[in-house]
Image (cartoon, rainbow, N blue to C red):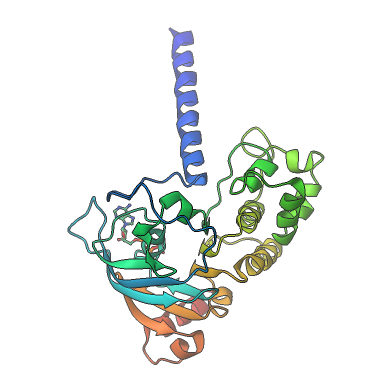
Amino acid sequence: IGASVAGLGELYGKVQSILGATEHIREVLDETPEPTHLAPTVGLVPAQISGDIRYEHVAFHYPTRPDIAVLQDIDFHIKPGEKIALVGPSGAGKSTIASLLMQFYQLSGGRILVDGHDVRDYDLTALRRHIGIVPQETLLFGGTIRENIAYGKPTATDDEIMAAARQANAWQFISSFPEGLDAVVGDRGIKLSGGQRQRVAIARAILKNPAILILDEATSALDSESEKLVQGALDELLQHRTSIIIAHRLSTIRKVDKILVIDGGRIVEAGSHDELSEREGGLYANLLRLQFELS
Ligand code: ATP
């Protein structure tokens, strides 16, 4: 009995780790649910987009919670190459705003346009090809560094992968591994630090070269050296792309073209850092003060 109980425990452990791994892969591969509306099977398949984004009076509730209006009257325009930061308290709706661009869910009202076309008129895969995401916490899958970087562009050559890794400030640590790009990451391979994982994710996005980037900034603290390298890599990545940044850092917020302050699912303030920080009693000015007091 002892042996079989031990065996069962082992089996349970294996099932858990397989389930865990699947979860990992799903997150990494952005294998997200198809939208619930009836997407046209044939839609626009643009070879290039300029990255003009318009949210027009967007309203949204999650399908599981029809009683809660998560977003109301979200209305903004980002011109090609511009960067906006979404800031606001936890649960305000920042991630939801960004995720709707990827059409993970159907809107309850309003519409979202990319390059003047309703996102619903695009072929979903074709549109997502032009959007890159750098998540808050990067999970790599258990393959080589090469596979992890080339995920967004499987046809990439080693030269392209190396160039992306260099721009992402990742080449130095990758080249320090005896196997270089062939080094295996994950449970059975090399453990990368949080900052190194982020730089691999940034290299992946640089290689994919999307016109639109969604960046969910990490809230977890990195050591200052890693922080500098990640910030430098992000500066490189954000250049010449329309970017929506879910921002937690002052250093990033200062660099964007426009800040949207989100509270309770609405845009409560919009403007530049200088404009908003001087607004007496404004939410942004208060958030800034809080951040200074905490740091
Ligand atoms: P944070 O800064 O903590 O990430 P956020 O501003 O990004 O917060 P969202 O994650 O967009 O906020 O969440 C907005 C609201 O929607 C919250 O009330 C949250 O509980 C709810 N919500 C988020 N995801 C789902 C979901 N999948 N199903 C139902 N409700 C959700």
The residue lying furthest to the left in this view is 67
Q: Is residue 169 above or below residue 39?
A: below
- Residue 229 can be seen in this image: yes
Report x, y in % for residue 246: 47, 67
Report x, y in % for residue 67: 17, 58
Report x, y in % for residue 261: 39, 77
- Residue 92 can be seen in this image: no
Asked whether, in this view, residue 13 is left or right of residue 106, the answer is: right
Q: Residue at x 72, y 54 (%)?
A: 165
Q: Is residue 252 above or below residue 17?
A: below
Quarter holding residue 73:
bottom left
Q: Residue at x 40, y 70 (%)?
A: 116
Q: Residue at x 45, y 29 (%)?
A: 16
- Between 222 and 117, the residue placed more toward the observer is 117
Asked whether, in this view, residue 227 is left or right of residue 113, the answer is: right
Report x, y in % for residue 173: 76, 51
Where's ligand 1: which quadrant?
bottom left
Asked whether, in this view, residue 58 is left or right of residue 295, the answer is: left
Q: Is residue 67 above or below residue 83?
A: above
Which corner quadrant holds the C terminus? bottom right
Q: Residue at x 36, y 89 (%)?
A: 281
